[in-house]
Image (cartoon, helix red, strand yellow):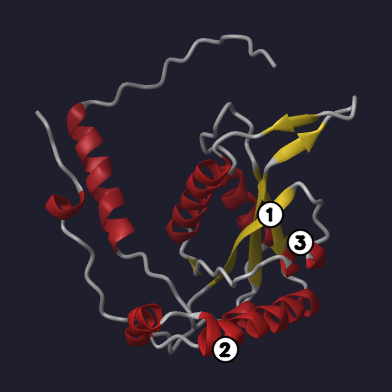
Amino acid sequence: MSYRPVPYRPERVPIEETLNRLRADLAIARARRSVRTFSTDAVPREVIELALSIAGTAPSGAHRQPWHFVAISEPELRARIRSEAEKEEREFYAHKAPKEWLDALAPLGTDFEKRHLTDAPWLIVVFRRDWEPLADGTRLKSYYMTESVGIAVGFLIAALHRAGLACLTHTPAPMTFLRELCDRPVNEKPFLILPVGYPASDCVVPDLERKALDEIATFVD
């Protein structure tokens, strides 16, 4: 596959404006929290469409864009997904999870019950596309699939937060049931589920602190 080169001349923002924009974005980002208690209030489909369009602008290995998003508002399907997820989660908490993982989860108060999968008005199921079928029967391979899809999900989470919505990264294990329920082909693997909506009026979140800059970054000037 070849691409025609086109000019790229983005606006060069004055440094003071650059800093102002980044400080404003940082303040917004610091307010983001994962939410497990959602309002059932409706969210218009156009909001989800725009957020997914932003996610689709993420960079990807060899520009394969190896992601597919299934956005679900239909109550029956959300209920089926919750039922299957809770089966896996019940087994995980009871038998599969190592003690250190359960100890790490304990302060968050999580368990196998996943009300957020039916309370949130939207579920976005993210799939990783490992290859694409070509007309001649061969396959177009994707590259750096996990990294690329992870970046796209980051774009999506940031877009949803800026829109005033909340979400939660949910990864029941195994997730193979999602391919069948969402009617996706064999070349796609479930990556995660994002319940999306407004926080419930009585929503609370753990009082957590994020690591300081000097704990997450090193500068070599």
Q: Residues within 10 Å of mark 3 (few under 14, many from 20)?
A: some
N-terminal of the pair, mark 3 or mark 1, is 3
Task: Check disc 1 and report the residue beneath it.
Answer: 189
N-terminal of the pair, mark 3 or mark 2, is 2
What residue is at 65 percent from the left and 78 percent from the top?
A: 85
Q: State the quadrant of the C terminus.
A: top left
What residue is at 80 percent from the left and 79 percent from the top?
A: 76
Q: Amino acid at mark 2?
A: Glu
Look at the image and tell me whether residue 114 can be seen: no
Q: In which image quadrant can residue 194 be found?
A: bottom right
Q: Residues within 10 Å of mark 1 (few under 14, many from 20)?
A: some
Asked whether 95 or 193 is in front, the reply is 95
Label 1 – label 2 distance at C-alpha: 24 Å
Label 3 – label 2 distance at C-alpha: 21 Å
In the image, residue 27 above or below residue 104? above
Residue 10 at x, y = what percent? 41, 21
Furthest residue in direction left, as rendered: 221
Label 2: which secondary element: loop
N-terminal of the pair, mark 1 or mark 2, is 2
Task: Check disc 3 and report the residue beneath it.
Answer: 179
Task: Check disc 2 and report the residue beneath it.
Answer: 113
Q: Amino acid at mark 3?
A: Arg
Label 3: which secondary element: helix
Pointers 3 and 2 in contact (C-beta within 8 Å): no
Q: Amino acid at mark 1?
A: Lys
